[in-house]
Amino acid sequence: MASVHEIEVKDSAARAAAAMPPAPVDELQDLQGDKMVLNMGPSHPSTHGVLRIVLEMDGEIVTKAIPDVGYLHRGDEKIAENMTYTQFIPYTDRLDYLAPLANNVAYALAVEKLIGIDGKLPPRCQYIRVICCELARISAHLLGLGAFAMDVGALTVFLHTFTEREKIYNLAESLTGARFTTSYTRIGGVSRDLPPGWHAACRRFCDEVVVNFDESERLLTRNRIFVDRTKGVGIISAEDAIAYALTGPNLRGSGVDYDVRRATPYLVYPELEFDVPLGSVGDSHDRYLVRMEEMRQSVRIIRQCLDRIPGGPDNASKEPVSVADGKVVLPAKRKVLTSMEELIHQFMLVTQGMNAPVGEVYFGAENPKGELGFYIHSRGGGTPYRLKIRAPSFVNLSILPKVLPGHLMSDVVSILGSFDFVMGECDR
């Protein structure tokens, strides 16, 4: 006979099992051979990372789809609670790791809004940040385009796009000291000014990359195979896109005119001229066309910034790139070694972080994948009490159960490629 303790343990285990949500595969029933449950991922090459999709198939037709995410979860939001605001900057590199420069800027702007210096950034700093964001947009879209094309059989485009991304990595390396995880932005500014010759190298890149855009479009836009694989595939209506809170090119591909840079302007975007491309059908082909045009608009923005940046290419007038506040930005090393006040500020910032006020803020930026947002709950001190990341890749994938059913298995690959998501950002 079982003891009372054994019975209690079994009862508690049963209650815990009943309270747990069903696994994705448990929600799909194999109807005595009429339908088949198929696991796509998490190691499938066209899922662009560790995304698992449980598909219910009726022959070649998808009848139900359940995305299963979390394989790359690292607990970034919890980690932020135990770090100063500055120490968390490198973790933003690992969100959309194809656009670390843009992630840095979005997070820094959220913290600057919290401490009330968002309107005090030097103009040169703002222009540098915009250039970084648009370079990150081009880099992320180039990889998304190349991977999308390769998924549907066009390998050559992937080689073309990677050639241009290598040039962006060279620019990032000379600017930040790193090619991949840049950690360039600082709260209140940037870590360093543009190095000598960088201005000319960036302008030269803008001239060269537009040639690559033309080549990629000639290979894809009217290619019969690519058109057949994308036209009329994965159609998302404007109503559904809004209902599922899609943002970025996936939203604008459905014809919804919403761009954070226009809707809630930040940095110097209100001073710059650029168009927001929109789709008309909302299919995979429209999402491809939107990203192609967005890259051209990014080049247009970068050229305007290079023309207007205060201080010129080599900053002859010594324009600042950070706010003049020793309680927020690390003081110059020369002053730290010669002044007691700066030494104290350096010690406090490094060991305890800046003293943020009590409050709650949200800031969203237009990242390559959509609106990357940071909600910060501060109870004072140098670390956030709570930090929540609105990851656009996570939100965009929520529409897969709606859009995948009714398509062929081969169309799933095309639809996923047109979504251009990154699992590091989705899982966080």
Image (spheres, rainbow, N blue to C red):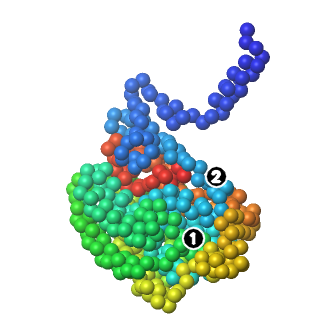
Report if the CB atoms under discs 2 and 1 are less than 8 Å apart. no
User: Where's residue 134, x and y in %?
Assistant: 43, 71
What is the C-alpha distance between the residues marked 2 and 1? 21 Å
Secondary structure state at the residue bearing disc 1: strand
Q: Residue furthest bottom?
A: 317
Q: What residue do we see at 70% from left, 69% from top?
A: 348
Tag 1: residue type?
A: Arg
User: Where's residue 305, x and y in %?
Assistant: 44, 81
Quick one: 223 or 236, which is closer to the camera? 223
Quick one: 47 or 222, which is closer to the camera? 47
Tag 2: residue type?
A: Lys
**Rendering quarter of residue 284:** bottom left
Secondary structure state at the residue bearing disc 2: helix
99 is higher (above) or lower (below) than 203 = above
Horizontal side of 216 relative to 109 (left or right) equals: left
Q: Which residue is mark 2?
A: 78
Any part of residue 371 in sight: no
Labelled disc at residue 97 = none
Horizontal side of 365 relative to 115 (left or right) equals: left
Q: Which residue is mark 1?
A: 186
**Rendering quarter of residue 23:** top right
